[in-house]
Amino acid sequence: MKAFVSRAIPPAGLQVLDTATGLEIDYNSHDAGLSKADLIARTGQSEGLLCLLTDTIDAEVLASCPNLKVISNMAVGYNNIDVAEATRRGILVTNTPGVLTDTTADLTWALLLAVARRIGEGERLVRAGEWHGWGPLQLLGGEVNGKTLGIIGMGRIGQAVARRALGFNMKVIYHNRSGLDPALESELKATRVGLDELIAKSDFVSLHAPYTKETHHLINAEKLARMQPTSYLINTARGPLVDEAALVAALKNNRIAGAALDVYEEEPVLYPGLRELDNAVLAPHLGSATHQTRGEMSRLAATNLVMALSGKRPLHPVNPDVLEKK
Ligand code: GLV
């Protein structure tokens, strides 16, 4: 069997692949994504593909790689893959949930605190040599402790974000298709509310929902208009959950107090005007970016690939229907 690894990944995953029996690996060891044509050419006749969220695996790629049996995405999100088309073709898709939950929740809090306490602006001031000493009116931000945190998408990462809010004595409200188990809800001191109520009542709105057709532009001009002018938006999930044009307008007009983003609609391109806004904290998609977590993601993605190619049920199938049909 052959498998292609589309981009440089941490060594832990490569070790798993190297020790798998009967597997021939082609590895793009460069830390840069491939063009679609190169991705297709390199995947070629392989049965397996280990890819990254920077690879778009659409119907054309799937049609051009006829032997593919397994696509292992080294990410928890898999909106970069046309899963419906993969399922139709009997191709199993896997992802890497669990290992990045706490790391992504930590980054969410780093951004929440940074935007509320104006860390980016302060750092720019200091680095520019323009800080002339402490001032009673200098860079006053929003209070975090005791405020209301609204979490949209209460899966693993949303719950880990809520758990951290306990330490800040915050009130947590959440919006999710299904409610949490009552014991967990009371442990997290979280209350489920409708989306409109969450938007209106939260001092911080944090997004943790997957990106699908249904969640496209979940936060649009209308939602931004209903947020409090003193509130903040944090997005560490996927860029297109937010209408970036509407967000830039809201930030320009101070319709909301600020936004902290780790993800963007057209990464790495930013919507015009976003970069110039002082009330935006902008991180370059760092949610899972720690040595430990990226190593675990790499190992898990490789393990999923090897298990699936050797006919075993992988640890994290995204479309298990494909297995059931076999
Ligand atoms: C990162 O964005 C991931 O989905 O793992």
Image: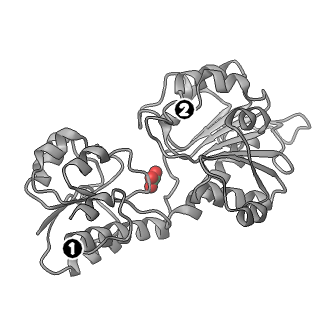
Task: Work out which residue is located at the far left of the displayed protein and give it.
Answer: 45
Residue at horizontal 73 percent and vertical 41 percent from the top: 204
In the image, which is nearer the foreground, mark 1 or mark 2?
1
Which mark is first along the chain, 2 or 1? 2
Q: Nearer the viewer, residue 298 or 304?
A: 304
Coordinates of residue 89 in the picture (x, y in percent): 18, 50
Q: Residues within 10 Å of mark 2 (few under 14, many from 20)?
A: many
Q: Is residue 132 left or right of residue 60?
A: right
Quadrant where the N terminus sits is bottom left
Residue 46 seen: yes
Q: Is residue 148 left or right of residue 108?
A: right
Quadrant of res 3: bottom left
Residue type pointed to by label 1: Gly
In the figure, 84 relative to 311: above or below? above
Coordinates of residue 9 in the picture (x, y in percent): 32, 63
Task: Determine the secondary structure under disc 2.
Answer: loop
Q: Nearer the viewer, residue 98 or 34?
A: 98
Residue type pointed to by label 2: Val
**What mark, if any, has residue 311 been given in the picture?**
1
- The way the protein has been coloured in the rendering is one colour
Residue at horizontal 10 percent and vertical 56 percent from the top: 67
Residue at horizontal 76 percent and vertical 56 percent from the top: 165
Q: Is residue 317 left or right of residue 68?
A: right
Mark 2, residue position: 242
Q: Nearer the viewer, residue 53 or 69?
A: 69
Coordinates of residue 275 in the picture (x, y in percent): 55, 29
Quadrant where the C terminus sits is bottom left
Task: Determine the secondary structure under disc 1.
Answer: loop
Quadrant of res 297: bottom left
Q: Is residue 146 left or right of residue 194?
A: right
